Image (spheres, rainbow, N blue to C red):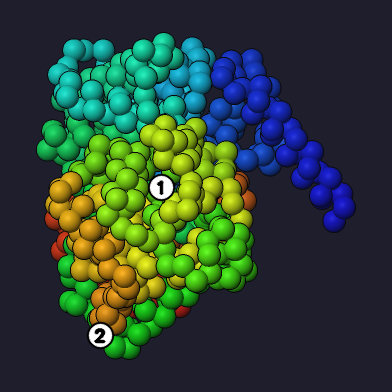
Amino acid sequence: MIVKRIVNKLVWYADRALSRIYHARHPGPFERRLIMAAAPLTLACQPNDKWNLHVHAPRWVEAVKCAPLTPLPRPKSIFIFCTFRGVFTTHLVLAVLLAWRGHKVTIGYLPKIQGPGKPPLIEHSSARPYLHSIMSRIGDLTKGAITCVDLYDDQRSAPVDSNFVIRQSRYDTIMTKQKETLDFADSEVKRFHELMAQSGEKTQIVINNHFRDHRYDVCIVGNGTTYDGAHACYVIKQLGQSVNATEKFAFRGVRVINHGDHFLAGDDLDYVWQERDRFGYTREPYYSKFLDKARESILERSRNSTKTWLWELQHAVNQSERDALKAANIPEDQPFILVCPNVVFDAGYGKITNIFPTMSDWLVETIKFLRERSSHLIVVRAHPGEGLYWGGKEPVHEVLSRHDIVPDDRLIIVPGQARVNTYRLMERCLFGVVFSSSTGLEMAVMGKQVVTASDIFYANRGFTQDAADRDDYFRQLAAVANQNEVAGLDAARGERALLFYFVYHWVMQYPYPYDKPSWIARRPPAKLLGSMDMKPFLPYLDLITMDAREFREEAHRYLSAEQILRRIETFDWRAYA
């Protein structure tokens, strides 16, 4: 046991060292041969697109030859868009599983391995030959079941949607700078913005060129809301080809699908929610079981549990309500309005900014309005993610102070890193105000009235106060804020919120065997297919290859109350970790 731990630690250090060496540039021919010669040690390292993909990939594609699990779906021609760090690993493994299901898969890739928003933003010249040395072999290794195409090979001219480029390059610059306030007089901001626009134009051109000569039954794009993936998703959709987005979201060991657009568009969620009665979610015994599961998930979330959840965000897990109020400097006997921003740079764009252009604008205007139109204490709980390394460079208190809004006897700002359990504040508040944070849904589940300021995924479902425009938003806010005592949601609306919470997390998130590259390393596809029961994963693998029409026709077969309850009672992601 001691020897094994020492070996594992040495492998870990070797992996970290090589990852740093190849942070920007990537192995040349001689280096690739050396890494391949050390294959036993390399395979013990976590899969890493930057330096060891050429050793892992041939092992993964062996799974295409594994015995199929019948019945097989109708074979289709599938296109997978692939670019950026980590995506080559995850999408190549997905392609292997889809080929195992009988589909013909084309991976169309951009030769970029760096993270899209991390410097250096210009890809090192070594990336393209390194990726070519790997991806060009996949067709022969799979006997044509998977084909890889460098989309940059086609340099023909093609149309570009300039309006989309302008809009998306701003969003991508916000993500890259991790702040909403962009000063285009700043040379760095200007450079980032220009690079995002150039990259977007180039992606639109190569996608248009490829689809000029090819048609597919279904195209798959990861996320589809940011960077090159957003341009790929948009252009494929504009060309009239079927596009689906997939994303790792809130739970461990699952993936989200949206048929027909990027994953935040919520088309699948809208459809399933509309059909909840027909699918049996409101019928006993399923209804009570599903509500109980939602309550259990909320409790896990408030306790920072990673039994199911991906993220650890609450810094005071077992805090009582009294202790939370004390830690936040909120008087115990004073009613307060709880305002919950998201992480500023990641608040959501496009569909979500339908009332306010940015979350910062919403926050500033909301605080000013509440100070003028209400006598209640206002508590702004900054997103706990602000205190983490990915939390951005524009914390809430800085956003407000730029507009001379500082804490006083009417306003308390609880920093992201404060040891305050947000859920205790939710339980205690008069009502909640949110922009794009899931806390609004969670407060509704707790029976609180919530005023939303965007087209967030849970808005207009019958349990929140939602607005059509800016004036409507402030009318809704005034109607609640002027009350001395704010009534909670009635039981029916509270249960409606609870059922929606269940549908969002337990129905729309499908079990998937590879949450992280480390999971792939421990159980490569061929080993997985030969040793594990793959039935829990077939819904994801089959639904992601359907177009939007097929999904609506087939959804009941996969997502009926009986199927969902069976999934909950029999699936445990820890068995695959």
Name the residue type under label 2: Arg
Q: Position of residue 205 (x, y in %)?
A: 23, 20
Residue sitting at 52 percent across and 43 percent down? Answer: 386
- Report, in whole angstroms, how far the alpha carbon at label 1 lies from the one at label 2: 35 Å
Q: Position of residue 338 (x, y in %)?
A: 40, 59
Q: Which residue is tagged 2?
A: 283
* Quadrant of the frame with the N terminus: bottom right
Front-most of residues 53 and 426: 426
Residue sitting at 52 percent across and 51 percent down? Answer: 414
Q: Position of residue 292 (x, y in %)?
A: 41, 80
Q: Earlier in the sequence, mark 1 or mark 2?
A: 2
Q: Which mark is residue 342?
A: 1
One can see residue 224 in this view: no
User: Is 42 situated above or below 253?
Assistant: above
Q: Which mark is residue 314?
A: none
Front-most of residues 142 and 569: 569
Front-most of residues 298 and 550: 298
